[in-house]
Image (spheres, rainbow, N blue to C red):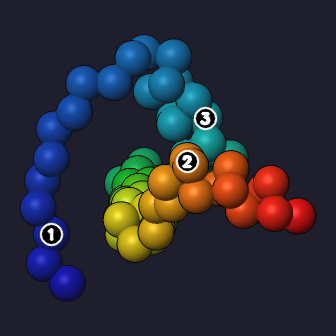
Amino acid sequence: METKMLDAHIPLPLAERLDALSLDLALPRDVIVTEAIAAWLDSEERRRIVALRTIAAANTIVVVEHDRVIDWADSL
């Protein structure tokens, strides 16, 4: 698979946690970062789909006039 080099400035405490995890798991940092980015992107894509479906569902809701609701409730 082709790759692309990305530069990112991250807070020092986060970098230290990444280094520690890399040592504990005996995995290169780039593997951990790649997995983290993939997981974040998957999550954001799912959230976007849910939001778009919610908007679409809201657009299909039938609105009933207030007076008609009152008339219906009074008829019960």
Question: Going from the N terminus, do you reach mark 1 or mark 2 first?
Answer: 1
The Cα–Cα distance between marks 2 and 3, rounded to whole angstroms, is 61 Å
Where does the image place residue 46, in percent across and percent down from the top left? 46, 67
In this picture, residue 69 sits left or right of residue 58: right
- Residue type indicated by callout 2: His
Q: Which mark is residue 20?
A: 3
Q: Nearer the viewer, mark 2 or mark 3?
A: 2
Q: The disc labelled 3 sits on which kind of residue?
A: Ala
Question: With 1 as the anchor, is 27 left or right in this view?
Answer: right
Name of the residue lying farthest toward the right = 76
Q: Of 62 and 12, which appears nearest the observer? A: 62
- Determine whether the residue tagged by mark 2 lies in a helix, strand or loop: helix
Query: What's the distance in space between the residues labelled 1 and 3, CA to CA?
Result: 24 Å
Q: Which mark is residue 3?
A: 1
Estimate how packed mark 3 is, as few (under 14), some (14 to 19) or many (20 or more) residues with alpha carbons within 10 Å.
few
Quadrant that contains the N terminus: bottom left
Residue at 68% over, 56% down:
71
Q: Amino acid at mark 1?
A: Thr
- Residue 70 locus on image (x, y percent): 68, 50
In the image, residue 39 sits, relative to residue 6, either above or below, namely below
> Is residue 4 toward the left or the right of residue 72 in the image?
left
Q: Quadrant of the C terminus?
A: bottom right
Name which quarter of the figure residue 25 lies in: bottom right
Q: In which image quadrant can residue 68 be found?
A: bottom right
Which is more N-terminal, label 3 or label 1? 1
